[in-house]
Image (tube, rainbow, N blue to C red):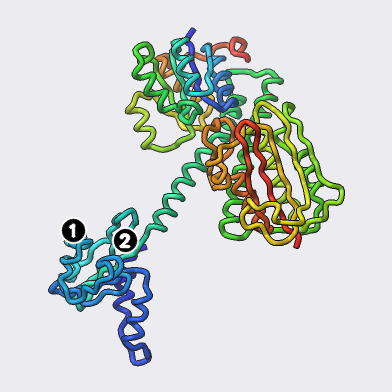
Amino acid sequence: MKTILVVEDAENLVRFVRVNLGVEGYTVTSARSGREGLEAALQTKPDLIILDLMLPQMGGWELLSRVRSHPDLYRIPILILTATANPEEEAHARRIGATDYLVKPVSASELVRHVRRILGEGTPPTPPAEDKSA
Amino acid sequence: MDSRTNASLHVENVQPTPSTSLSTTDLLGVLARLRDAVLLVARDHTITFLNPAALRMLSFGEDITGRDVRTCAVLSKDDDIWRGLDIVLAGGAFPVLERIIDGAAYRFELTSLPIGAMILIHNSTREQQAERFRNALISTVSHELRTPLASIKGYATTLLRKDVTWDAVTQREFLEIIDEESDRLRELIDSLLDMSKLESGVLHLERVPVQLARIAHRAVHGLRLASERHRVIIDFPRDMPLVDCDPRRIEQVLRNLIENAIKYSGNGGTITVRGQVVDNPAVLRDVQAAPNCPFVMISVSDTGPGIAEDELDRLFERFHRAVGVDQHIGGIGLGLYICKGIVEAHGGWIWAQSELGKGTTISFALPFC
């Protein structure tokens, strides 16, 4: 079972990511600040980090560079999920190691599609609904 | 708008006609009053005229009429201006140039004239600052609007997923989040509209005699951010006079101050909303611009961590968010700015006092003279 760490300070958005990726079979953990995010990443070594850029106590930019320069973490793909819709920032984020960049708002299916693509899982055949209930 | 074209049109139109009675002295008077620098250069590069603004900007007050324009360092050091000048002296056109000189922004317009060339220099620092502010505003606003929108879109599409069936309780929870975030979005939009009204001076007040204690109770009951960890005390004297004000706007101020007090004292505590009549304005010597008449003073105090001295002055600035405040404390940084605008529109004033580790008090006063 693959694990995903969501680093996001808006509680409602953490839950949005958690429920939608949870029903897909991922284990989702969360951190509310950049600092907590780095600690959690070191502890759990997730398969993917979903990262907001504007975070308290160490912003997303710093976390992104720290993960990319850490010998134990640098391979972890990072999906940026941000409210900053600025092409220059997106280019910069990709340059310093973001795997993918999504601008809020995103739909549930968009989120799932991007996560699946990053984790190399494509879109699976639709499973029976009873396996997917909350 | 092509300002270069306008400038040349303007100059070409200043042809004395039989019906005008403007003398050369009149025209020179007009040029002397211009804030923009105007410099005329003959085909042999001699400066034939410069107005007082040009004297200030280009030659430190020294009259350089009759000299070669190349002696003017500001112009001759800049290759583009220099090239442009030669082009317009030969009858051509040259685009407007933007330059930063000693931290100020300038626009150089070079125009070809029958008598040579005109260089018009406009200090565009203010326009550029306004432009920067507009860009920052758009980026802040779009970021802030996207955050609640992300939840609305996120939960709506979560509910719409065809491959998942959510139970009734979960469905309701998601709908409640959508509802709550829509309120947040509406508040942001209201704040932006209020800001715009304040800045264009069209905030309309409907003043009526008001019992402020009632407004304070209404503000507390209408709190969106109800908190079980905080105790709110409302303390108004019984003989508080009626005050002429817009009850809806003053309630908005109070609600904002109380919500701030709750937000910024996250661990709970007591919030006191106190009203008092101050007959002698001298009691508030610290407050600048206190009017020389009696007033009512309303304070909202919390027992939170307090605000550092150097932050206090900036609290009422637009888009200011206190340093060290966690982003999860929602807000665009307009609340206190709007409160200040509303209070000042009433002829009152607002200020903050704080002690680190003890709490913060924001007070506002409304004169009733």
Question: Mark 2, residues whose alpha carbon is within 10 Å: few (<14), some, or many (≥20)?
Answer: some
Quadrant that contains the N terminus of chain B:
bottom left
Measure the C-alpha gap from mark 1 to mark 2: 16 Å
Which residue is the extreme one toward the right?
Answer: B238
Tell me the element at label 2.
Answer: strand
Label annotation for residue B77: 1
B310 vs B40: above or below: above
Tell me the element at label 1.
Answer: loop
The structure residue drawn at horizontal position 16% and vertical position 66%, both measured from the top left corner, is B71
The structure residue drawn at horizontal position 48% and vertical position 46%, both measured from the top left corner, is B138
The structure residue drawn at horizontal position 35% and vertical position 32%, both measured from the top left corner, is A92
Can the viewer see residue B75 in this picture?
yes
The structure residue drawn at horizontal position 44% and vertical position 11%, both measured from the top left corner, is A45
Answer left or right for B233 relative to B73.
right
Q: Nearer the viewer, residue B140 or B228?
A: B228
Label annotation for residue B107: 2
- Expressed as whole percent of the image width and height from the top left, the position of residue B6 reads 34, 70
Q: Amino acid at mark 2?
A: Arg
Question: Mark 1, residues whose alpha carbon is within 10 Å: few (<14), some, or many (≥20)?
Answer: few
Answer left or right for B347 relative to B76.
right
